[in-house]
Image (spheres, grey):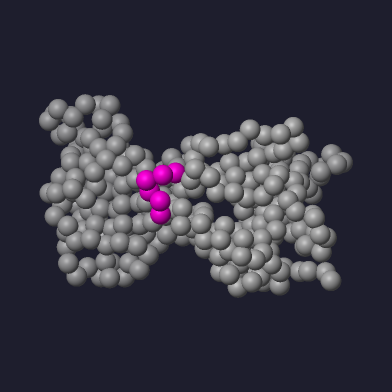
Protein backbone atom coordinates (compact mmCIF):
# COMPACT_ATOMS: atom_id res chain seq x y z
CA UNK A 1 0.00 0.00 0.00
CA UNK A 2 1.36 3.43 -0.90
CA UNK A 3 1.32 5.90 1.97
CA UNK A 4 0.75 9.63 1.59
CA UNK A 5 1.17 12.69 3.78
CA UNK A 6 -1.01 15.81 3.68
CA UNK A 7 0.98 18.77 2.33
CA UNK A 8 -0.59 21.48 4.51
CA UNK A 9 2.17 22.27 7.02
CA UNK A 10 1.80 23.29 10.65
CA UNK A 11 4.24 26.08 11.48
CA UNK A 12 6.47 25.67 14.54
CA UNK A 13 9.02 28.23 15.66
CA UNK A 14 11.09 26.46 18.32
CA UNK A 15 12.21 23.02 19.43
CA UNK A 16 9.58 22.52 22.14
CA UNK A 17 6.66 23.44 19.85
CA UNK A 18 7.91 21.01 17.21
CA UNK A 19 8.10 18.11 19.64
CA UNK A 20 4.70 18.98 21.12
CA UNK A 21 3.22 18.69 17.62
CA UNK A 22 5.03 15.38 17.13
CA UNK A 23 3.65 14.17 20.46
CA UNK A 24 0.06 14.88 19.39
CA UNK A 25 0.50 12.67 16.38
CA UNK A 26 2.53 9.86 17.90
CA UNK A 27 0.13 9.55 20.86
CA UNK A 28 -2.69 9.42 18.31
CA UNK A 29 -1.10 6.23 16.97
CA UNK A 30 -0.08 7.84 13.67
CA UNK A 31 2.93 6.04 12.15
CA UNK A 32 5.28 8.75 10.96
CA UNK A 33 8.64 9.59 9.54
CA UNK A 34 10.84 12.30 11.01
CA UNK A 35 13.38 14.17 8.87
CA UNK A 36 16.23 16.19 10.36
CA UNK A 37 18.90 18.26 8.59
CA UNK A 38 22.10 16.97 10.17
CA UNK A 39 24.55 18.95 8.02
CA UNK A 40 24.28 22.11 5.91
CA UNK A 41 26.93 23.85 3.83
CA UNK A 42 26.88 27.20 2.02
CA UNK A 43 23.55 28.62 0.88
CA UNK A 44 21.44 25.58 1.66
CA UNK A 45 17.86 26.65 2.54
CA UNK A 46 17.64 23.87 5.12
CA UNK A 47 19.87 24.74 8.04
CA UNK A 48 21.31 22.23 10.47
CA UNK A 49 18.63 21.24 12.97
CA UNK A 50 15.63 21.94 10.71
CA UNK A 51 13.06 19.17 11.18
CA UNK A 52 9.91 17.84 9.59
CA UNK A 53 7.42 15.26 10.83
CA UNK A 54 5.50 13.28 8.19
CA UNK A 55 2.55 11.41 9.75
CA UNK A 56 0.79 8.99 7.42
CA UNK A 57 -2.40 10.57 6.13
CA UNK A 58 -2.03 13.63 8.37
CA UNK A 59 -0.73 17.19 8.23
CA UNK A 60 3.02 17.74 7.98
CA UNK A 61 4.84 19.59 10.74
CA UNK A 62 7.92 21.77 10.32
CA UNK A 63 10.25 22.19 7.35
CA UNK A 64 13.64 21.03 6.09
CA UNK A 65 14.07 24.04 3.78
CA UNK A 66 11.11 24.11 1.41
CA UNK A 67 11.01 24.18 -2.38
CA UNK A 68 11.37 21.32 -4.83
CA UNK A 69 14.08 19.76 -2.65
CA UNK A 70 11.66 19.35 0.25
CA UNK A 71 8.91 18.00 -2.02
CA UNK A 72 11.30 15.37 -3.45
CA UNK A 73 12.34 14.23 0.01
CA UNK A 74 8.71 14.05 1.16
CA UNK A 75 7.90 11.83 -1.82
CA UNK A 76 11.00 9.69 -1.22
CA UNK A 77 10.14 9.28 2.46
CA UNK A 78 6.52 8.37 1.69
CA UNK A 79 7.79 5.63 -0.64
CA UNK A 80 10.22 4.32 1.99
CA UNK A 81 7.40 3.99 4.53
CA UNK A 82 6.26 0.98 2.47
CA UNK A 83 9.65 -0.70 2.63
CA UNK A 84 10.65 -2.53 5.77
CA UNK A 85 14.14 -1.74 7.01
CA UNK A 86 14.40 1.60 5.17
CA UNK A 87 14.96 3.68 8.31
CA UNK A 88 17.13 5.28 9.50
CA UNK A 89 18.46 6.69 6.23
CA UNK A 90 20.84 9.48 5.29
CA UNK A 91 20.27 11.52 2.12
CA UNK A 92 22.65 14.12 0.72
CA UNK A 93 21.15 16.96 -1.34
CA UNK A 94 23.36 19.21 -3.49
CA UNK A 95 21.78 22.47 -4.67
CA UNK A 96 23.49 22.84 -8.06
CA UNK A 97 22.05 22.39 -11.53
CA UNK A 98 25.20 20.90 -13.08
CA UNK A 99 25.68 17.98 -10.71
CA UNK A 100 24.36 14.49 -11.35
CA UNK A 101 24.19 12.38 -8.24
CA UNK A 102 22.35 13.83 -5.21
CA UNK A 103 21.06 16.86 -7.18
CA UNK A 104 18.20 18.44 -5.21
CA UNK A 105 16.54 20.37 -8.04
CA UNK A 106 17.51 23.74 -6.51
CA UNK A 107 20.28 26.02 -7.79
CA UNK A 108 21.12 28.12 -4.72
CA UNK A 109 24.48 26.30 -4.34
CA UNK A 110 25.42 24.72 -1.04
CA UNK A 111 24.23 21.34 0.16
CA UNK A 112 22.51 19.62 3.04
CA UNK A 113 22.30 16.11 4.44
CA UNK A 114 19.00 14.86 5.85
CA UNK A 115 18.48 11.91 8.22
CA UNK A 116 15.17 10.05 8.22
CA UNK A 117 13.62 8.02 11.06
CA UNK A 118 10.46 6.00 11.61
CA UNK A 119 8.44 6.72 14.78
CA UNK A 120 5.62 4.49 15.96
CA UNK A 121 4.31 2.76 19.05
CA UNK A 122 5.12 2.96 22.75
CA UNK A 123 8.86 3.35 22.27
CA UNK A 124 8.28 6.47 20.16
CA UNK A 125 5.69 7.80 22.63
CA UNK A 126 8.17 7.41 25.50
CA UNK A 127 11.00 9.03 23.51
CA UNK A 128 8.95 12.11 22.60
CA UNK A 129 7.54 12.45 26.14
CA UNK A 130 11.06 12.34 27.57
CA UNK A 131 12.27 14.94 25.07
CA UNK A 132 9.49 17.35 26.07
CA UNK A 133 10.11 16.75 29.78
CA UNK A 134 13.82 17.50 29.26
CA UNK A 135 13.06 21.12 28.33
CA UNK A 136 12.00 21.72 31.95
CA UNK A 137 15.12 20.16 33.48
CA UNK A 138 16.84 23.47 34.10
CA UNK A 139 19.49 21.93 36.35
CA UNK A 140 20.96 19.66 33.67
CA UNK A 141 21.39 20.09 29.94
CA UNK A 142 20.29 17.32 27.61
CA UNK A 143 21.15 16.50 24.01
CA UNK A 144 19.48 14.57 21.23
CA UNK A 145 21.63 12.07 19.39
CA UNK A 146 20.55 11.31 15.82
CA UNK A 147 22.59 8.34 14.65
CA UNK A 148 22.78 5.27 12.48
CA UNK A 149 20.82 3.34 15.10
CA UNK A 150 18.09 5.85 15.98
CA UNK A 151 17.29 8.87 18.16
CA UNK A 152 18.45 8.97 21.80
CA UNK A 153 18.14 11.51 24.61
CA UNK A 154 21.44 11.79 26.48
CA UNK A 155 23.07 14.03 29.12
CA UNK A 156 24.87 16.91 27.42
CA UNK A 157 28.46 16.08 26.56
CA UNK A 158 28.22 12.33 27.08
CA UNK A 159 28.88 11.46 23.47
CA UNK A 160 29.94 7.99 22.47
CA UNK A 161 32.75 6.80 20.23
CA UNK A 162 31.60 5.94 16.72
CA UNK A 163 32.28 2.80 14.75
CA UNK A 164 33.80 3.01 11.24
CA UNK A 165 30.41 2.95 9.45
CA UNK A 166 28.44 5.04 11.94
CA UNK A 167 27.36 8.67 11.81
CA UNK A 168 25.96 10.95 14.51
CA UNK A 169 24.44 14.40 14.82
CA UNK A 170 24.04 16.00 18.25
CA UNK A 171 21.66 18.79 19.18
CA UNK A 172 21.41 20.52 22.56
CA UNK A 173 17.81 20.91 23.72
CA UNK A 174 16.99 24.56 24.28
CA UNK A 175 13.68 26.05 25.30
CA UNK A 176 12.50 29.04 23.33
CA UNK A 177 14.43 32.28 23.99
CA UNK A 178 12.91 34.88 26.31
CA UNK A 179 12.32 38.57 25.58
CA UNK A 180 11.52 41.07 28.34
CA UNK A 181 9.82 44.28 27.16
CA UNK A 182 9.78 47.07 29.73
CA UNK A 183 6.78 49.15 28.71
CA UNK A 184 3.35 48.10 27.49
CA UNK A 185 2.50 50.69 24.86
CA UNK A 186 1.75 50.33 21.15
CA UNK A 187 5.28 49.31 20.12
CA UNK A 188 5.35 46.77 22.95
CA UNK A 189 2.09 45.27 21.70
CA UNK A 190 3.33 45.05 18.11
CA UNK A 191 6.70 43.65 19.21
CA UNK A 192 5.02 41.07 21.45
CA UNK A 193 2.99 39.86 18.48
CA UNK A 194 6.05 39.72 16.21
CA UNK A 195 8.31 37.94 18.69
CA UNK A 196 5.63 35.43 19.67
CA UNK A 197 5.34 34.63 15.97
CA UNK A 198 9.12 34.09 15.89
CA UNK A 199 8.98 31.60 18.74
CA UNK A 200 10.07 33.80 21.65
CA UNK A 201 8.63 33.70 25.14
CA UNK A 202 7.56 37.30 25.84
CA UNK A 203 7.34 38.96 29.27
CA UNK A 204 5.97 42.52 29.52
CA UNK A 205 6.48 44.96 32.42
CA UNK A 206 4.79 48.31 33.04
CA UNK A 207 4.13 50.59 36.01
CA UNK A 208 0.65 51.62 34.84
CA UNK A 209 -2.72 49.94 35.37
CA UNK A 210 -5.60 49.87 32.91
CA UNK A 211 -3.72 50.45 29.63
CA UNK A 212 -5.69 49.45 26.53
CA UNK A 213 -2.53 48.06 24.95
CA UNK A 214 -1.84 46.04 28.10
CA UNK A 215 -5.23 44.32 27.95
CA UNK A 216 -4.97 43.89 24.15
CA UNK A 217 -1.64 42.08 24.50
CA UNK A 218 -2.64 38.43 24.32
CA UNK A 219 0.74 37.50 22.82
CA UNK A 220 2.90 37.87 25.95
CA UNK A 221 3.19 34.78 28.11
CA UNK A 222 3.61 36.94 31.23
CA UNK A 223 2.60 40.51 32.16
CA UNK A 224 3.67 42.25 35.38
CA UNK A 225 2.81 45.63 36.93
CA UNK A 226 6.02 46.79 38.60
CA UNK A 227 7.80 49.72 40.18
CA UNK A 228 10.29 50.96 37.57
CA UNK A 229 12.64 52.03 40.38
CA UNK A 230 13.12 48.33 41.24
CA UNK A 231 13.68 46.78 37.80
CA UNK A 232 16.88 45.01 38.83
CA UNK A 233 14.78 42.78 41.09
CA UNK A 234 12.78 41.64 38.07
CA UNK A 235 15.62 41.52 35.53
CA UNK A 236 18.84 40.32 37.19
CA UNK A 237 21.81 39.02 35.21
CA UNK A 238 20.74 36.56 32.54
CA UNK A 239 23.16 36.02 29.62
CA UNK A 240 20.38 34.37 27.57
CA UNK A 241 17.73 37.08 28.06
CA UNK A 242 16.80 39.71 25.45
CA UNK A 243 15.65 43.04 26.93
CA UNK A 244 13.89 45.95 25.24
CA UNK A 245 13.27 49.24 27.09
CA UNK A 246 10.22 50.97 25.63
CA UNK A 247 8.53 52.81 28.49
CA UNK A 248 6.35 55.91 28.27
CA UNK A 249 9.13 58.48 27.94
CA UNK A 250 12.60 59.85 28.62
CA UNK A 251 12.36 59.98 32.43
CA UNK A 252 11.32 56.37 32.91
CA UNK A 253 13.61 55.08 30.15
CA UNK A 254 16.54 56.81 31.85
CA UNK A 255 15.56 55.38 35.24
CA UNK A 256 15.32 51.86 33.85
CA UNK A 257 18.46 51.97 31.70
CA UNK A 258 20.67 53.23 34.54
CA UNK A 259 19.65 50.16 36.57
CA UNK A 260 19.95 47.53 33.83
CA UNK A 261 22.99 48.70 31.88
CA UNK A 262 25.51 46.94 34.15
CA UNK A 263 23.71 43.60 33.92
CA UNK A 264 24.63 40.82 31.50
CA UNK A 265 21.99 40.13 28.89
CA UNK A 266 22.06 38.59 25.46
CA UNK A 267 20.65 41.86 24.09
CA UNK A 268 19.72 45.23 25.59
CA UNK A 269 17.93 47.75 23.39
CA UNK A 270 16.46 51.19 23.99
CA UNK A 271 13.55 52.61 21.97
CA UNK A 272 13.86 56.27 21.06
CA UNK A 273 15.02 58.83 18.54
CA UNK A 274 18.69 59.46 17.82
CA UNK A 275 18.44 62.83 19.59
CA UNK A 276 16.87 61.30 22.70
CA UNK A 277 19.62 58.68 22.82
CA UNK A 278 22.32 61.32 22.33
CA UNK A 279 21.03 63.48 25.19
CA UNK A 280 20.53 60.51 27.52
CA UNK A 281 23.95 59.01 26.85
CA UNK A 282 25.69 62.39 27.24
CA UNK A 283 24.08 62.79 30.67
CA UNK A 284 25.09 59.25 31.62
CA UNK A 285 28.69 59.84 30.50
CA UNK A 286 28.78 63.00 32.64
CA UNK A 287 27.58 60.86 35.55
CA UNK A 288 30.44 58.42 35.13
CA UNK A 289 29.05 55.68 32.88
CA UNK A 290 32.00 54.49 30.73
CA UNK A 291 31.75 54.60 26.94
CA UNK A 292 32.30 50.81 26.69
CA UNK A 293 29.29 50.23 28.98
CA UNK A 294 27.06 52.54 26.92
CA UNK A 295 28.22 50.75 23.78
CA UNK A 296 26.49 47.56 24.98
CA UNK A 297 23.10 49.18 24.37
CA UNK A 298 21.44 48.90 20.96
CA UNK A 299 20.24 52.47 20.61
CA UNK A 300 18.40 53.74 18.72
CA UNK A 301 16.95 50.26 18.69
CA UNK A 302 16.28 48.25 15.53
CA UNK A 303 17.67 48.12 12.02
CA UNK A 304 17.58 51.44 10.10
CA UNK A 305 14.68 50.71 7.73
CA UNK A 306 12.93 54.10 8.11
CA UNK A 307 10.20 52.47 10.19
CA UNK A 308 7.30 54.67 11.31
CA UNK A 309 4.34 52.63 12.53
CA UNK A 310 4.50 50.43 15.65
CA UNK A 311 4.33 47.38 13.40
CA UNK A 312 7.24 48.57 11.24
CA UNK A 313 9.27 49.45 14.34
CA UNK A 314 8.55 45.98 15.72
CA UNK A 315 9.87 44.39 12.52
CA UNK A 316 13.08 46.45 12.71
CA UNK A 317 13.64 45.47 16.36
CA UNK A 318 12.84 41.82 15.66
CA UNK A 319 15.32 41.77 12.78
CA UNK A 320 18.08 43.16 15.01
CA UNK A 321 17.32 40.63 17.76
CA UNK A 322 17.31 37.74 15.28
CA UNK A 323 20.67 38.96 13.99
CA UNK A 324 22.08 38.76 17.54
CA UNK A 325 20.48 35.37 18.19
CA UNK A 326 21.84 33.81 15.01
CA UNK A 327 25.27 35.44 15.04
Residue drawn at (27%, 40%), measured in percent from left and top? 237
Residue 306 location (% of width, % of height):
41, 48
Residue 109 location (% of width, % of height):
72, 39
Q: Looking at the picture, tell me which residue is in the foreground, 79 or 69.
A: 79
| Res. 233 in view | yes
Q: Is residue 5 above or below residue 87?
A: below
Q: Is residue 139 magenta?
A: yes
- Left or right: 80 in relation to 160: right
Residue drawn at (35%, 68%), measured in percent from left and top? 218
Q: How many labels sit on residues?
A: 0
Secondary structure mostly seen in the magenta stretch: loop
Q: Is residue 138 magenta?
A: yes
- Left or right: 246 in relation to 113: left
Q: Is residue 2 above or below residue 229?
A: below
Give the extent of the magenta segment: 136-141
Residue drawn at (78%, 69%), measured in percent from left and top? 3
- Left or right: 159 in relation to 7: left
Residue drawn at (74%, 46%), measured in percent from left and top? 90
| Res. 71 in view | no
Where, by quadrant of the figure, is residue 54 drawn? bottom right
Amino acid sequence: MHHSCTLNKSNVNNQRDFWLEVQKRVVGSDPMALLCVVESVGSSPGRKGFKMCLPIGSELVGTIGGGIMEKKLIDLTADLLDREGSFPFLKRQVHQADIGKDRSGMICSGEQTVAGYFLYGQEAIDLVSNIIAAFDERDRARELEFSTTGIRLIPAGERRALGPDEWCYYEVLRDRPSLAIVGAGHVSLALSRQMDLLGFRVIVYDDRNGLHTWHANTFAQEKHVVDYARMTEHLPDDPELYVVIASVGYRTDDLILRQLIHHRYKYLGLLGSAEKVRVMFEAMRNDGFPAEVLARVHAPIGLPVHSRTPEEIAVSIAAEIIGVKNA
